[in-house]
């Protein structure tokens, strides 16, 4: 009996170890529930009050429907993917989004396709005043955020509105550092532009070309920020607020006699063709202006000025065009 006791103890011990090893194997191979990502764990619901209402975002958006090209540029700057977007008028600096078949076509800027948006199953919709009449329907599909930019009159705080929207999107998507960096870059570019325009005496006229006709944009118009934020001096004291400017004649341009003329070729945008040249625009009255005589008629980046003009990339391009008039 004494001799068998150690053997029995060893056998019991080996059996216990085998059982324990079996339990260990089961624990090691058991499937684990996927852990929430750091961004999901850290996300705090965001509430945004805007002109059309209040939008509450409970979770980090993963599928974003975008109805304005400024918004596409914001997301591009932040490195946030776009699930679907309107594709009728896409600026040349965002064409890769239009050509990407994985990004669903949501129709037109003025008339987005609500069926396509619904089928996309977005968890966030980004829109502007151009789609304001669809806000209620869009809000029933997903949380919908309105960009409070004033396309009629950008005289006051245009750059600040753009920056604040950029920072809001940065907070929503966990890209605060990138948003702050982009906002600082924009501030620096605006400051540099103001250094150029501050003590310069030149006066400028912004005109929109549309199939041979012209419109002028003053200090209270969609390009009011050029005079206000960038410090460009206006060649005309006419005050008009509006999206398409005040219709003018060649005589008006001659009488205003600006030192600089910025030409926004709307026809090029609408017909998807190259911007017109000075030779194509030439007429006897325009040739009499100081701007024409001194070679300071600037044919601007029409996509940046007409399709967008309220995002990081487009504002940088607008500023570059403005400074060409002072060179």
Image: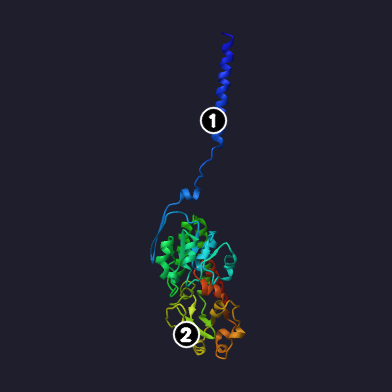
For the C terminus, the image quarter is: bottom right
At x 56%, y 29%, the residue is 22
Reading the image, the residue beneath label 1 is 23
User: Distance between the Cα atoms at labels 2 and 1?
Assistant: 84 Å
The residue depicted at 50 percent of the width and 58 percent of the height is 63
Q: Disc count in the image?
A: 2
Task: Give the label, 2 or 1, closer to the camera.
Answer: 1
Element on which disc 2 rests: strand
How far across and down, in percent of the image, does residue 281 sit?
58, 85
Q: In which quarter of the image is the N terminus?
A: top right
Across and down, in percent, residue 65 comes to 49, 63
Locate residue 285: give its quadrant.
bottom right
Q: Mark 2 points at which residue?
A: 247
Residue 9 in view: yes
For numbered disc 1, what is the local secondary structure?
helix
Q: Which of 205 and 302 is in front in this view?
A: 302
Query: Is residue 196 at least partly visible in the picture?
Result: no
Towards the viewer: 82 or 274: 82
Q: Which residue is drawn at 55% across and 27% down?
A: 20
């Amino acid at each position: 009996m004494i001799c068998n006791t150690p053997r029995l103890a060893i056998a019991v011990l080996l059996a216990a170890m085998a059982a324990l090893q079996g339990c260990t194997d089961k624990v090691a191979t058991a499937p684990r529930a996927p852990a929430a990502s750091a961004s999901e764990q850290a996300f705090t619901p965001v509430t945004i009050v805007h002109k059309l209402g209040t939008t509450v975002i409970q979770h980090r958006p993963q599928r974003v429907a975008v109805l304005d090209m400024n918004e596409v540029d914001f997301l591009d700057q932040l490195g946030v993917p776009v699930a679907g977007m309107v594709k009728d008028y896409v600026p040349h600096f965002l064409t890769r989004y239009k050509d990407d078949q994985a990004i669903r076509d949501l129709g037109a800027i003025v008339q987005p396709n609500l069926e396509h948006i619904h089928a996309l199953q977005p968890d966030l919709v980004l829109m502007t005043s151009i789609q304001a009449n669809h806000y209620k329907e869009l809000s029933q599909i997903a949380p919908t955020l309105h960009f409070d930019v004033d396309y009629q009159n950008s005289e006051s705080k245009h750059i600040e509105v753009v920056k604040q929207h950029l920072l809001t999107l940065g907070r929503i998507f966990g890209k605060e550092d990138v948003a702050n960096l982009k906002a600082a870059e924009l501030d620096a570019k605006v400051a540099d532009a103001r250094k150029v325009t501050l003590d310069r005496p030149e006066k400028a006229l912004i005109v929109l070309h549309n199939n041979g006709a012209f419109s002028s944009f003053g200090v209270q118009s969609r390009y009011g920020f050029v005079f206000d934020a960038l410090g460009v001096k206006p060649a005309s004291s006419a005050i008009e607020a509006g999206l398409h400017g005040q219709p003018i004649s060649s005589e008006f341009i001659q009488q205003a006699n600006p030192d600089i003329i910025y030409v926004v070729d709307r026809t090029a945008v609408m017909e998807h063709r190259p911007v017109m040249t000075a030779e194509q625009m030439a007429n006897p009255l325009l040739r009499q202006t100081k701007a024409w005589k001194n070679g300071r008629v600037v044919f601007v980046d029409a996509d940046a000025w007409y399709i967008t003009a309220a995002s990081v990339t487009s504002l940088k391009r607008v500023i570059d065009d403005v400074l060409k008039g002072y060179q």
